[in-house]
Amino acid sequence: MSYFTLENGEKLYYEDEGSGENTILMLHGWTSSHYIFTEPALQLKEKARCIIYDHRGHGGSKYANKEIVTMETLAHDLNEMITELSLNNVTLVGWSMGVCVIFNYVRLYGCDKLKQIILCDMAPKLMNDENWNLGLYQGEYTQADRVLDESRSALYQYKKFILGTAPKLKTLPRFILNTTLIKRLLKCDVKVIKSLSSDMEDQDNRDVINKITVPLRYFYPMPGSLFSPKLEKWYRENAVSEFKSVGFENSTHLLIAENPTKFAQEISKLL
């Protein structure tokens, strides 16, 4: 096991394999881990250096939690890793919360060390209102829903998120589903994931699209689950740099786990 030591002494679990002039750095989503990228990284490491890691409070970095963790914290961590590992010409890939980390990174540090950015199924603004209906739960999640959710347990919030991500899980018996989710939650620091969830919901990163000066790619599922496929049109119309998109048919928010080979192939085409 390998750990990257941050300036404050916290340690992040990471894997660094492959070589070449291209570097692919992949950022996982909320309550997930580097594991979501394991299979694609295995397929890509013959063509590029592939780095995957666990954010604070997740997986192998569960105990990197000595301070309040926000999206900016994770963006600072990303910058430390890029700087200390002397990375340049980076293809930066974010899925779900990983996209929010990328937005914060670009806002704080720009795109000088990046070759391109690949965003996977995530809105720049989660909360829906009278002027925005491309956010969480296909445009139906509002501040009123958020207030109710914040009064409930971490398990309730996580279960709602998972069922929105993969609706087929609704067919599982409640006991089996709850037991599985509890085991998954035990791999995370609940305080950290609640802090990150709240911070993501506070953010509006729509203006960051104007700061992305490298080629921008958007991978999205059809018909989708957490987010509407209509987000592709928003990114296309608002990108100021070269833009391309890839749709993953018959997929949900878990498009990477559902299509690891296609995911790797589409990234390979962009190197």
Image (cartoon, helix red, strand yellow):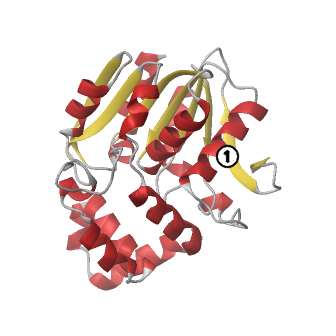
Residue placed under numbered mark 1 in the picture: 77
Most foreground residue, 168 or 93: 93
Q: Residue at x 50, y 70 (%)?
A: 194
Q: Is residue 33 visible?
A: yes
Q: Quadrant of residue 144?
A: bottom left
Report x, y in % for residue 1.
Answer: 75, 51
Relative placement, left or right, of 199 versus 130 is right
Rate crowding at label 1 as few (under 14), some (14 to 19) or many (20 or more) other CA atoms within 10 Å: many
Q: Residue at x 42, y 74 (%)?
A: 181
Q: Residue at x 26, y 72 (%)?
A: 145
Q: Residue at x 37, y 26 (%)?
A: 217
Most foreground residue, 113 or 218: 113
* Above or below: residue 244 compared with residue 145: above
Relative placement, left or right, of 99 versus 5 is left
Report x, y in % for residue 135.
Answer: 26, 51
Looking at the rendered structure, the kind of residue marked 1 is Asp
User: How many marks overall?
Assistant: 1
